[in-house]
Image (spheres, rainbow, N blue to C red):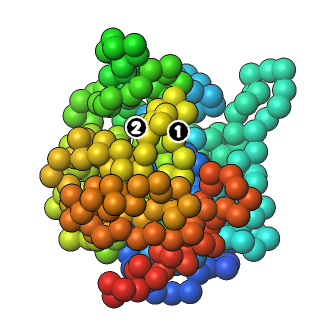
Amino acid sequence: MTDERLGAMASELSRASSRAQPPPGGPKVVALGGGHGLYASLSALRVVTDALTAVVTVADDGGSSGRLRRELGVLPPGDLRMALAALCGDDEWGSTWSEVVQHRFRSEGDLHGHAVGNLLIVALWELLGDPVAGLDWVGRLLGAHGRVLPMASVPLDIVAQVELDGVISTVRGQVACAQTAGRVQSVTLVPEDPPARPEAVEAVLEADWVVFGPGSWFTSVLPHLKVPELARALHRTRAQRLVTLNLAPQPGETDDFSPQQHLEVLRQHAPGLSLDVVLADAGVVDDLDALDKAAAGFGARLVMADVAATDGSPRHDPRRLASVLDEIFLQKR
């Protein structure tokens, strides 16, 4: 692509990205995760701060992402696409582009199931030769209220130790881990020492807040702690660390998990990690004392709030979550 064409694109995208930006100010926030959980977190955080970075897992091996990963050898784009869609504004430009990048083709041919955003992201990766530059270009096109980064420079495989009827077995792949009939005990990554994206490490080290969750605990949240350089940054950062707990167990991953069990598993995967805040919905906690004790084990205070959707579904309501997060952030400014 020529410098002239890139310059023309930059001018147009600059005008697009200026639309409906959130009010200036707010802390530097890094949100970790993937999939629908990170989407919920970013949908709330983008109205709280204009200094927002998503660091996204790159282990998806199913659907459109898995097909592109296997065919082209690229990072799986699906979770990155969802994060970008979550950062779109509520104006006509943002809501339209959010729908466009999330749109999936329905056909009897090879395009069936592919998301438009996945193809757009991979096309820019091929043109620019740099995953982060490609994501930045898509973000500017969408007028995204924040930046999206992959947590690692190479595609990853999740390997889980799974217990079923007293027998421990090994399951490989994000889809297989998420759908296992057994109970996931722990996860590791292949390769074991993947290179972290330097931009992601820098964002964590410079953040005021790092937010873990909500999301699929073993396949979206914990993998960040298994990328050594990123894990070191998460331990070293001066940022406040906040965990947003899930509203319900994840079928196939955390069946029958209590909120405090999510924290216990986090402790197992990151023994030296300290936390500052654990946020839980008041309506899903059965044993408040046990959860408070688990949070205190990380050095964290427990914040109970109504952050669930009002329709009874196990989803976080973006407006409620944004209001609570804003209040927590303000208390530390």
* Neighbours of disc 2 within 10 Å: few (<14), some (14-19), many (20+): many
The residue lying toward the viewer, choosing from 187 and 167, is 167
Position of residue 106 measured from the top left corner of the image (x, y, whole percent): 83, 31
Say if mark 2 contacts mark 1, CB within 8 Å: yes
Q: Which element type, helix, strand or loop, lies under badge 2?
A: helix
Residue 7 visible somewhere in the drawing: no
Residue at image location 35% in from the left, 68% down from the top: 302
The residue lying toward the viewer, choosing from 172 and 214, is 214
* Neighbours of disc 1 within 10 Å: few (<14), some (14-19), many (20+): some
Residue at image location 30% in from the left, 70% down from the top: 301
Task: Tell me which numbered mark, 2 or 1, is placed earlier along the sequence.
Answer: 2
Q: Which residue is mark 1?
A: 250
Q: Quadrant of residue 108?
A: top right
Q: Which element type, helix, strand or loop, lies under badge 1?
A: loop
> Is 265 positioned to the left or the right of 273 in the image?
right
> Is 206 positioned to the left or the right of 84 in the image?
left
Q: Which residue is mark 2?
A: 218
The residue lying toward the viewer, choosing from 61 and 239, is 239
Q: Amino acid at mark 1?
A: Gln
Q: Amino acid at mark 2?
A: Phe
- In front: mark 2 or mark 1? 1
Position of residue 103 measured from the top left corner of the image (x, y, whole percent): 76, 45
Residue 300 visible somewhere in the drawing: yes
